[in-house]
Amino acid sequence: MTTLQEIQYLQNRIKQRSVAWNDRKLASEKLKVASDSLCSKLPFKWQIIGAENCFNNHNGSSHGKEHIVLEQDWSQGRIKRKIGDALCKTSAQFKGNLSLEPWEGSYVNCKACLEKAFKIINPD
Ligand SMILES: [Zn+2]
């Protein structure tokens, strides 16, 4: 079972410019496995949807994070989500930046989505 700490460690490693490219690639492959295994346990139907970044990234793309987007209404405790909402934010909060199509071969890399998913699967 992947812990939230492991996921956060991998996410930080991928972001660090000082880490060698190969190591960042490896961390990103590990994160995909951890992310896929975590998200496969979610108790509702969902898909991976990317959000456009309002500001261009340093490499000139507008590729933002990939989120867990619900394919059904769902609520648990204080979290209430409708179909089309991401786990981290409602679709309205994205102000139209959620794209409609899932990105091929992608995995959930939104930190807030993964943290929420982890808490849903491991309630304390
Ligand atoms: Zn998210």
Image (tube, rainbow, N blue to C red):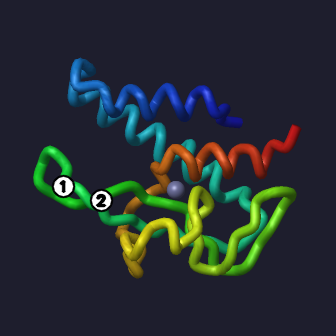
Q: Residues within 10 Å of mark 2 (few under 14, many from 20)?
A: some
At horizontal 72% and vertical 60% (from top left) the residue drawn is 42
Q: Quadrant of the C terminus?
A: top right
Q: Amino acid at mark 2?
A: Asn
Provide residue 119's location: percent of width, then percent of height: 75, 44
Closer to the camera, 69 or 40?
Answer: 69
Q: Is residue 52 left or right of residue 58?
A: right
Q: Is residue 2 left or right of residue 59?
A: right
Q: Specify the quadrant of the image occupied by residue 94.
A: bottom left
Whether disc 2's CB lies below 8 Å from ligand 1 is answered no
Closer to the camera, 123 or 98?
Answer: 98
At horizontal 58% and vertical 56% (from top left) the residue drawn is 88
Q: Which mark is residue 53?
A: 2
Distance, label 2 to label 1, CA atoms, is: 6 Å
Q: Specify the quadrant of the image occupied by residue 4.
A: top right
Q: Amino acid at mark 1?
A: Asn
Label 2–label 1 contact, CB within 8 A = yes
Image vertical order of residue 86 relative to residue 72, above or below: above
Q: Secondary structure at mark 1?
A: loop
Q: Secondary structure at mark 2?
A: loop
Provide residue 57's location: percent of width, then percent of height: 19, 49
How many numbered circles does the render carry? 2
Q: Is residue 122 left or right of residue 86?
A: right
Q: Which mark is residue 56?
A: 1
Closer to the camera, 110 or 41?
Answer: 110
Provide residue 67's location: percent of width, then percent of height: 50, 60
Image vertical order of residue 29 relative to residue 105, above or below: above
